Image (tube, grey):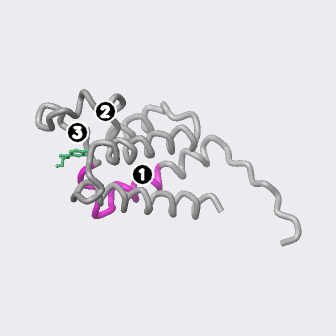
Amino acid sequence: PIYCAKKTKTHKDELGICRVLLAELEAHQDAWPFLTPVNHRAVPGYRKVIKKPMDFSTIKEKLTSNQYLNLETFIIDVNLVFDNCERFNEDDSEIGRAGHRMRRFFDKRWTELLQ
Ligand SMILES: Cn1cc(C(=O)NCCN)ccc1=O
């Protein structure tokens, strides 16, 4: 179209998109390393190396308790999950590869939903 009005999204619209995106992340077959907080007692070094742990269940709790201002603050936390994963895991490892696949899936989906 020659004229494309910028469709502003209300806070409610953006939070609806966050709920859809989170449900799709949780349902993904490669989500298993990210569904719950990393057990730092079972994973040596994790607590020391990863300053800001994040996982999908924590994001869900923050979403349902209205701790996200907008889509941007939600995307920052989702990216934190994948950045932590890259920092702690070899690219050539089960969890490292799952992280890359999940990040690629997320980037594709939120850009699709925002178009
Ligand atoms: C994301 N991540 C997950 C684990 C893990 O062991 N998750 C429990 C799977 N059941 C270990 C390191 C790591 O960076």
User: Please, what is the dominant secondary structure of the magenta stretch?
Assistant: helix
**Magenta segment range?**
19-33
Q: Name the residue under label 3.
A: 38
Separation (CA) of disc 1 from disc 2: 22 Å
Q: Which residue is drawn at 22% across and 59% down?
A: 94
User: Would you name the residue on which mark 1 appears?
Assistant: 22
Residue 57 image position (x, y, % from top left): 32, 42
Determine the residue positioned at 54% across, 52% down.
Answer: 17
Identity, as a three-letter code, of the amino acid under mark 1: Leu
Image coords of residue 102 (percent x, y) = 37, 58
User: Is the CB of mark 3 within 8 Å of ligand 1?
Assistant: yes
Q: Which of marks 2 and 3 is in front?
A: 2
Question: Label 2 CB, ligand 1: below 8 Å?
Answer: yes
Q: Residue 50 carries which label?
A: 2
Mark 3 vs mark 1, CA separation in Å: 18 Å
Q: Earlier in the sequence, mark 2 or mark 3?
A: 3
Toward the right, the furthest residue is: 2
Judged left or right of residue 14, residue 75 is: left
Q: In which quarter of the image is residue 70?
A: top right
Residue at 30% across / 56% down in the picture? 91
If you read the primary sequence from the N terminus, does the residue marked by circle 3 or circle 1 appear first? 1
Q: Which amino acid does label 3 sit on?
A: Val
Q: What element carries label 1?
A: helix
Q: Check contact, mark 1 vs mark 2: CB within 8 A.
A: no
Label 3: which secondary element: loop
Name, please, the residue furthest toward the left: 42
Element under disc 2: loop
Tell whether label 3 touches label 2 (CB within 8 Å).
yes
Q: What residue is shown at x 29% (from left), y 48% (from top)?
A: 34
